[in-house]
Amino acid sequence: MIFATGLNCPEGPVVLPDGSWVVVETGAERGCVTHISANGRTRRILNRTGRPNGLAVDRDHVIWVAESSPPSLIRMKLDGSYEVVMTGCHDDPFLFPNDLCFGPDGALYLTDSGIRFEDFAPGGRIRDDYLTALYDGRIYRIVPATLEIRRIDRGIKFTNGIAFGVDGHLYANETITGAVMRYRWKGGTLGPREEFGNVLDPAKSGFRGPDGMAFSEDGRLYCTVAGQGDVAVLGRDGRLIDRIYTQGAFPTNCAFGLNRERKLYVTEFAHGQMEVFDVDAAGLPLMDGSMR
């Protein structure tokens, strides 16, 4: 089923408490954060920021935006007013803020793909040598109240989606290799990077890789695979258990609906739409910046 159409390269869907949605439209013609009604029929642009990529919404309904051009972290209100709150980690500038989520400690976790968007996709086209390009993907932890920032990891080949699982561990993915990585949560700190699974289909070729992802309450990880045209479903052991095929070849992110409905909403870049799929479980509720 199609939930919303007419979007310009959509990404980063987040459902709000009233059932409406915020997404980003990354296309150069818009470059905005957009509010979509609960029935998907109407939408309004909150504001144009450049090339926003990922979103997270806190308990005060503040929208945190991973902005890729110019690279920055933005704090936005539902009336569209916003401020740029950060452009790097101390003296190390952001390159490509990509996605973000809140953790059980109330902190905001942000991925940076490790290459400027303009260098990765000059003129909007992914470079031919993307497999061998230089990447220094990072993951950051940010305290929203003080904007204290700390780098957790680096040297990742295009860090992309990020989410906390039912086990309390942090998961992020690496687009170029197809890997989903796990950082075990132990006593309030994160352990080292370890590979959890891989979402690439060996029968496919060309650019493809994991993008946004979300967990269901039964522990399954739903990971959009951009360029491959599917949402890979991984079990608790990291093994592939299913693929959900999208209408377009470039699904970019996914989120579950409200009220424990067993529906997965997927933004699809090529057709400019949000697609909806019936799934076996409700979504794991997203954290909102509160301590747990």
Image (cartoon, rainbow, N blue to C red):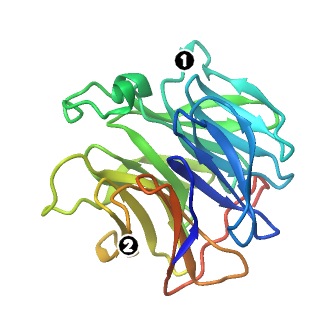
Query: Which amino acid type is shown beneath numbered disc 1?
Result: Pro
**Residue type at numbered disc 2:** Val
Tell me how far mark 2 sits from mark 1, CA to CA. Answer: 34 Å
Which comes before the other along the chain, label 2 or label 1? Answer: 1
- Measured as percent of width and height from the top left, residue 288 is found at 75, 56
Depicted 79 relative to depicted 51: above or below: below
Q: Up-down: is 9 above or below 76? A: below
Residue drawn at x 53%, y 23% is 94
Can the viewer see residue 136 in this picture? no
Q: Is residue 45 visible?
A: yes
The C terminus lies in quadrant: bottom right
Q: How many residues crowd mark 2 within 10 Å: few (<14), some (14–19), many (20+)?
A: many
Task: Name the residue rendered at 28%, 52% in the picture.
Answer: 178
Quadrant in the picture for residue 89: top right
Q: Which mark is residue 79?
A: none
Q: Circle 1 sits in a helix, a strand or a loop, which is it?
A: strand
Q: Which residue is mark 1?
A: 93
Residue closest to the far left: 203
From the viewer's perspective, is 46 left or right of 124? right
